[in-house]
């Protein structure tokens, strides 16, 4: 293979069979063969497929999902990388970096300010500026742990959702998601919470249960759990819960108790949750028994636009001036020296032409991802080698970026 016969480009529909073969080799073949792509519906909305070719042969591929996700109180355009694969015989030959770099440059040009992915191994992406900031995880809770959840107080009760409740369910999700760093906004396909996928005869779930307070027009929806019953009725069975989102502890209790009411016919509740790498989801704090086993899927973050990502944030109303830099030879697109000015809850980031090496806190790309997302304190990022230089601004930096936990609930 010579580098002048290689090309890194958006894929065309003609690349689909070869790209699918690579994907099936890397991630396993789909159980039912996929139909030929429909030229009128390819690529799927919000997906940007890329390939690397050598002498015309497809030798690597990936897909970039375009969505918005919540960081620091705003919905940020996000490039979610998925299906990254290099042909078995070509691995280790330097295809990954130029392919990723080209797709990242396009994402930045289209306005994405951060990029995220679920790695099969975190080490693949560290050199490209990504770092683990959280995890989406399936947590298995034994029914015995739910038996002792106190009944909800304050008139909170559970009822089954209908199609008419889906807007309220979306509002609950948004109230939760907008207070975290990381969750997808679910404003875009395929992540949108569509009524026909949530409730009714073709729904993905057995039911969506609500935690509500009040009646009639005064009724307030305070939480929801979307759950699938699964087969069988002995203690080996598991009730699977895609989402359990509660805006009050009593709403969380109502939902956990509803799930716990299956104790005679199922032994486990498996909940899609997050936070294991940075802080447990608060809905789990009402469980008196912490017995649970988790299968985490780490989530990695990389910034694409440093002034854009920091400058979009809504932060604490502190007045501060912090010089900082990113120095990371692996990610030349992110390197720079800036001064951050915070006032009235907003941030401005200006480039500094007159910076002197070593005069300011200096992050690696991964260190900045961890610190900006609130996944780790400045002190911990220093311990991990992601931050060096003067430490006198660390406390202010943490006050700006450290107030939200990282959570994510959608796999791609
Ligand atoms: C992962 C994959 C795309 C990497 O392609 P590649 O050509 O082998 O990558 P490279 O040899 O250029 O290595 C890139 C970096 O990843 C690291 N890496 C590669 N395989 C790794 C592994 N299994 N675990 C941890 N790190 C790994 C390399 O050390 C290198 O790190 P560096 O940038 O710090 O030097 C390829 O091995 C593959 O297709 N694997 C099977 C599918 C898969 O796991 N895809 C990723 C899905 S998230």
Image (cartoon, helix red, strand yellow):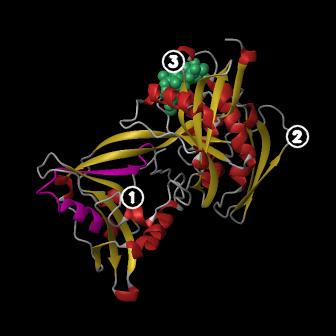
Q: Looking at the picture, how far across and down is residue 214, in whole percent?
A: 34, 84
Q: Name the residue under label 1.
A: 282
Label 3 C-beta lies within 8 Å of the nearest ligand 1 atom: yes
Label 1 C-beta lies within 8 Å of the nearest ligand 1 atom: no
Q: How far apart are marks 1 and 3 (CA)?
A: 42 Å
Q: Name the residue under label 2.
A: 353
Regarding residue 146, the answer to whether it shows in the image is: yes
Q: Quadrant of residue 25?
A: top left
Q: How far apart are marks 2 and 1 (CA)?
A: 44 Å
**Picture residue at 50% right of the left edge, 55% below the top:** 191
Question: What secondary structure is found at the residue carrying circle 3?
Answer: helix
Q: In which quarter of the image is the N terminus?
A: top right
**Picture residue at 68% right of the left edge, 64% below the top:** 345
Front-most of 250 and 196? Answer: 196
Q: Residues within 10 Å of mark 3 (few under 14, many from 20)?
A: few
- CB within 8 Å, label 2 to label 1: no
Looking at the image, which residue sits at the far bottom?
A: 217
Q: Mark 3 points at which residue?
A: 88
**Image: 346 above or below 213:** above
Q: N-terminal of the two: label 2 or label 1?
A: 1
Q: Looking at the picture, how far across and down is residue 325, in whole percent?
A: 74, 39
Nearest to the eye among marks 2 and 3: give it. Answer: 3
Front-most of 13 and 143? Answer: 13
Regarding residue 363, the answer to whether it shows in the image is: no
358 relative position to 121: left or right: right
Indicate yes or no whether the magenta region holds residue 272: yes
Question: What secondary structure is found at the residue carrying circle 1?
Answer: helix
Point out the stretch of residues depicted in magenta.
Answer: 254-277
**Image: 288 above or below 200:** above
Question: What secondary structure is found at the residue carrying circle 2?
Answer: loop
**Image: 16 above or below 154:** above
Q: How far apart are marks 2 and 3 (CA)?
A: 45 Å
């Amino acid at each position: 293979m010579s580098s002048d016969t290689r090309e890194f480009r958006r894929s065309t529909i003609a690349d689909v069979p070869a790209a699918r073969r690579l994907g099936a080799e890397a991630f396993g073949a789909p159980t039912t063969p996929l139909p030929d792509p429909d030229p009128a519906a390819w690529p799927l909305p919000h997906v940007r497929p890329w390939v690397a070719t050598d002498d015309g042969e497809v030798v690597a591929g990936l897909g970039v999902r375009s969505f918005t996700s919540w960081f620091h109180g705003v919905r940020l355009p996000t490039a979610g990388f998925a299906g990254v694969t290099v042909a078995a015989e070509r691995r280790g030959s330097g295809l990954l970096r130029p392919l990723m770099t080209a797709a990242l440059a396009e994402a930045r040009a289209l306005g994405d300010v951060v990029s995220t992915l679920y790695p099969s191994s975190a080490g693949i992406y560290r050199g490209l500026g990504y770092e683990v900031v959280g995890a989406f995880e399936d947590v298995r809770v034994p029914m015995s742990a739910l038996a002792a959840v106190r009944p909800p107080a304050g008139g909170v009760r559970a009822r089954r959702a209908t199609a008419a409740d889906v807007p309220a369910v979306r509002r609950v999700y948004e109230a939760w998601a907008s207070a975290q760093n990381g969750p997808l906004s679910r404003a875009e396909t395929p992540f949108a919470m569509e009524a026909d996928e949530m409730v009714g005869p073709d729904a993905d779930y057995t039911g969506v249960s609500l935690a509500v307070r009040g009646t009639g027009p005064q009724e307030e929806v305070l939480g929801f759990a979307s759950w699938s019953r699964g087969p069988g009725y002995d203690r080996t069975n598991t009730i699977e819960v895609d989402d359990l989102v509660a805006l009050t502890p009593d709403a969380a209790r109502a939902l956990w108790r509803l799930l716990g009411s299956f104790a005679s016919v199922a032994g486990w509740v498996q909940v899609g949750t997050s936070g294991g790498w940075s802080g447990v989801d608060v809905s789990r704090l009402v469980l008196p028994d912490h017995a649970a086993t988790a299968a985490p899927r780490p989530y990695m973050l990389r910034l694409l636009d440093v002034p854009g990502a920091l400058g979009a944030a809504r932060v604490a109303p502190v007045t501060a001036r912090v010089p900082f830099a990113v120095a990371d030879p692996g990610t030349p697109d992110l390197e720079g020296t800036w001064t951050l000015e915070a006032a009235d809850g907003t941030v401005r980031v200006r480039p500094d032409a007159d910076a002197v090496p070593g005069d300011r806190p200096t992050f690696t790309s991964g260190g900045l991802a961890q610190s900006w997302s609130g996944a780790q304190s400045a002190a911990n990022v220093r311990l991990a080698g992601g931050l060096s230089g003067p430490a006198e601004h660390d406390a202010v930096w943490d006050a700006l970026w450290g107030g939200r936990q990282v959570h994510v609930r959608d796999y791609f």
